[in-house]
């Protein structure tokens, strides 16, 4: 689906497009904080979620994942042998990207970029507690309870969140304080 304003952008230079984009005021960003937080929550329908890690040589590696967010902390279950775990052990700086799959009408596509520091949790009791919390909230526990693969919990604490489309097309909301 093509939006009306796409023609407007085709007529602009790159410098003009970049000059239009300005970070939202703290007041405007605060106004949509709860909406942004709900968008990245585990129960947000209609979003695709991706985890970005880095290879030793710095190249990015991106994988679609399931993400369960408590507060602003993002958690993903992984299997021991997955490549992303090796990447995280070498460089715990990761990114998550949530993208709206079906924007409605004339609204601008919503997306949230979260960068943070990822901790790999290997303790089975902590992983079990994660599954229990997730089951209590979503009804979805360990989908592979009978399988013998070793589960890891990837727990990411955010350092920056950039939310686009919540305040229009040229006004991203940025968050650096995750105490609320």
Image (spheres, rainbow, N blue to C red):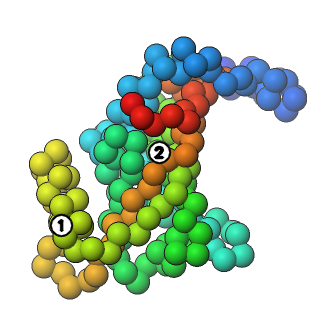
- Which of the image's four quarters has the C terminus? top left
**Relative horizontal placement of residue 88, taking residue 45 as reference (left or right):** right
Q: Quadrant of residue 144?
A: bottom left
Camera-side residue of 19 and 57: 57
Residue 33 figure quarter: top left
Q: How far across and down, in percent of the image, does residue 43 sit?
A: 27, 41
- Secondary element under disc 1, as helix, strand or loop, is helix
Q: Residues within 10 Å of mark 1 (few under 14, many from 20)?
A: some
48 relative to 107, above or below: below
Residue at position x 16%, y 45% in the image: 137
Picture quadrant of residue 28: top right
Looking at the picture, does residue 65 appear above or below residue 4? below
Q: Which residue lies at the image location 55% right of the left edge and 46% below the top edge?
A: 159
- In contact (CB < 8 Å): disc 1 and disc 2: no
Report if residue 85 is visible in the image: yes
Residue furthest front in the image: 179
Question: Is residue 143 among the parts visible in the rendering?
Answer: no
Q: Position of residue 170 (x, y in %)?
A: 66, 23
- What crowding class fits label 2: few (fewer than 14 Cα within 10 Å), some (14-19), or many (20 or more)? many
Residue at 54% over, 65% down? 92
Q: Which residue is mark 2?
A: 98
Q: Residue 119: where, in percent of width, then height?
A: 44, 64
The residue indicated by pointer 1 is 128
SS at mark 2 in the image: strand
Instruction: Tell me the number on the disc at residue 2.
Output: none
Which one is in front, 120 or 1?
120
- The alpha-carbon separation of the residues under discs 1 and 2 comes to 25 Å
């Amino acid at each position: 689906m093509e939006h009306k304003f796409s023609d407007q952008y085709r007529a602009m230079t790159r410098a003009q497009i970049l000059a239009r984009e300005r970070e939202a005021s703290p007041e405007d960003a605060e106004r949509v904080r709860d909406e942004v937080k709900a968008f990245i929550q585990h129960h947000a329908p209609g979003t695709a979620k991706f985890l970005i890690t880095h290879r030793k040589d710095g190249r990015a590696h991106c994988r679609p994942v399931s993400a369960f967010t408590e507060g602003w902390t993002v958690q993903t279950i992984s299997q021991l042998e997955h490549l992303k775990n090796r990447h995280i052990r070498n460089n715990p700086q990761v990114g998550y990207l949530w993208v709206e799959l079906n924007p409605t009408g004339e609204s601008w596509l919503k997306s949230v970029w979260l960068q943070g520091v990822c901790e790999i949790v290997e303790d089975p009791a902590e992983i079990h507690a994660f599954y229990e919390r997730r089951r209590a909230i979503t009804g979805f526990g360990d989908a592979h309870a009978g399988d013998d693969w070793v589960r890891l919990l990837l727990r990411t604490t955010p350092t920056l969140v950039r939310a686009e489309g919540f305040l229009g097309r040229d006004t991203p909301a940025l968050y650096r304080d995750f105490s609320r």
